Amino acid sequence: MRELARAAFVIARRDFSAVVLSRTFILFLLGPILPILIGFAFGGLGERISSTDLRPVLGVALSAQDNVAIGRAREQLAERMGDKALARIRLMPPVADPRAQLARPDARAVAMLTGTLARPVLTGKAEDLDRLQGDVSLMATAALAERTLRFVPVERQEVATSRGAQSQGRLLIGRIAQVVMFFLTILLAGMILSNLVEEKTNKIIEILAAAVPIDAIFLGKLMAMLAMSFVGIAFWGMTAFVVFVVLGGQPAALPAPAVGWPAFLILAVLYFAMAYTLLGSLFLGIGAQAATVREVQTLNMPITMGQMLIFFFATYAVDHMGSPAEVAACIFPWSSPFAMIARAGQDAALWPHLLALLWQAVFVALIIRIGVLLFRRHVMQSGGRWWKSLFRPATG
């Protein structure tokens, strides 16, 4: 076992150095950041476009007293409903012919309101009247209510804590952790699929297999990719923190998870590592059977879609703590990390997490072992019955 660990460490150090010290790793680190920056740029453009007020303008040509009343009513309604919930109005002197007013070249209003508050007359195109009729009725009704709105005062009683709000906050924390873990796993674990293809093509894998056990090769490559993932996460996390501080953001007031923030963050790191190694060991075993990059790309899509279904199953189980679905999600190896991190946000017990981590580690070892045996049998053309040698060290 010591020799296996030492050989795995040598392979891990070799692969880690080859990946992290390469120029392409910088592009890999910048890869997720560029779409985010582009998204912010388009988001700012979209916000600028949406801030341009495209609501229809209603020309209000009532008497001076009615104009003041309806203008005040709109302000009071906008305080409760929001300014964008109502049409914009433009107060104008009374006009004899609203049709002629709308036909003028310098007309800004799409419809004209004339008559009185008790009997308003709306003039305009049919589609504009459909949009404005409800607003006009609401504003005229509010203006007639003694020319002002009288809101009933509400007495406030504040409490320090609310169990309902706390439960909702903890559920939100669990969901956020699930989503972050899933996207990081999908983003980073896919690299393992093609990890062995190049070395198989260049016959390097045969040299390695002659020097160290194949178990050590698989385990070392998995360790190297996991370490590389943590480097990428640290870089992206620091970048996000710096941007957050520079923009003057304020942290959201979320309740503490049931297990507490220190334990929750530690469990999040451990469960990400297990989710990555569970999927990565599967990717490594499948990728080791592929002969070309095209085969790897063909295999990537169905595996990713299957992982998405597992993730949706885990997110469904979050809302049903203690149900058979939630228990099944915690037991099934590939959904277990996502289900258990959500449980950590809602349940203070720590012993289930120790069992879950041990259970997941056993499956990682089992998947690596099966992948090694299949690799030896179908790629290295060695070995007998794979089930007979399942628990016997593979030496190449």
Image (cartoon, rainbow, N blue to C red):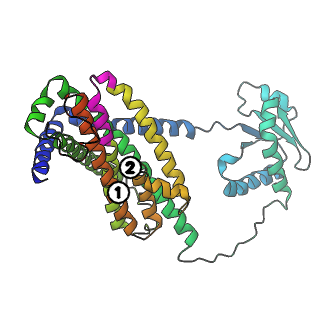
| Residue drawn 82% across the image and 55% down it | 143
| Residue drawn 77% across the image and 41% down it | 92
Looking at the image, residue 364 lies above or below residue 298: below
Tell me the tag on residue 359.
Answer: 1
- Name the residue carrying label 2: 181
Q: Secondary structure at mark 1?
A: helix
The magenta stretch spans residue 294: yes
Residue 54, by quadrant, is: top right
Mark 1 closeness class: few <14, some 14–19, many ≥20 residues within 10 Å = some
Instruction: Report whether 21 appears left or right of 286.
Output: left
Closest to the camera, between mark 2 and mark 1, is 1
Query: Residue 253, can we see it?
Result: no
Residues rendered magenta in the picture:
280-295
Q: Residue 279 location in percent, x, y?
A: 34, 43
Looking at the image, residue 330 lies above or below residue 121: below
Cβ atoms under marks 2 and 1 closer than 8 Å:
no
Tell me the tag on residue 351.
Answer: none
